[in-house]
Image (cartoon, grey):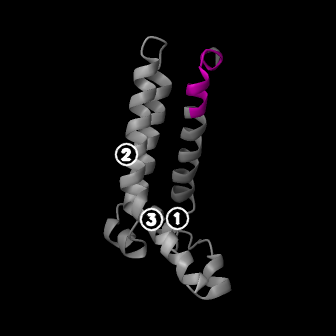
Amino acid sequence: MSWLKKLSFYQWISLCFAFVIICIIGYSAIYSTIRNGYSLSCMYVENFGVECPSCGMSRAFSLILNGDFNTAHTLNNNALSLFGFLLLQLFLRLTTIFLYNKKRALLIKRTDALVSIISFVILFGPFILEWVSFFLFLTQ
């Protein structure tokens, strides 16, 4: 555990993000809706009777981990891109943790930021737009 003491602040942030991503993926693997029938209820469905853009995401992530991509896409059309974003970010976080050094710090930070911003806009953009239109729908 002495290597933890040598991590830079940037590496610690990456480690925290990697931990959160692993928890999300682990949750989807452990609490499989296929095996356990466990699913979170949506507060929008309960309160307004309308499905939100996140409805089906937990079940879709479980299905992706089981290799059922078509059903996952049917449950939530953003699930594949969001899961891909999580995997890309996990790869970037782990790369940042293990390849980071003072000589390449600026290059790694800039590359990380650029790849993260571009992938966020491409993979999360449609999901965010769905949420915006959803809230506009609710306010009418």
**Front residue of this view, candidates 23 and 131:** 131
Q: Within 10 Å of the Cα at label 1, are there few (<14), some (14-19), or many (20+) other Cα atoms? A: many
The residue wearing badge 1 is 32
- Considering the whole magenta stretch, tell me its main secondary structure: helix
The local secondary structure at tag 3 comes to helix
> Which of pointers 1 and 2 lies earlier in the amino acid sequence?
1
> Looking at the picture, does residue 112 appear above or below residue 100?
below
Place of residue 94 in the rendered image (x, y in percent of width and height, measured from the top left): 47, 32
Question: Which secondary structure lies at badge 1?
Answer: loop
Q: Is residue 51 above or below residue 88?
A: below
User: What residue sits right under mark 3 in the picture?
Assistant: 127
* x and y, in percent, of residue 39 in the image: 58, 72
Q: Magenta residues, as a range?
A: 3-13
**Quadrant of the drawing holding the N terminus:** top right
Quickly name the residue at label 2: 118
* Secondary structure beneath label 2: helix
Mark 1 vs mark 2, foreground winner is 2
Asked whether the viewer can see residue 34, the reply is no
Whether residue 40 appears in this view of the structure is: yes
Q: Residue at x 37, y 75 (%)?
A: 74
Lateral position of residue 8 relative to residue 129, left or right:
right
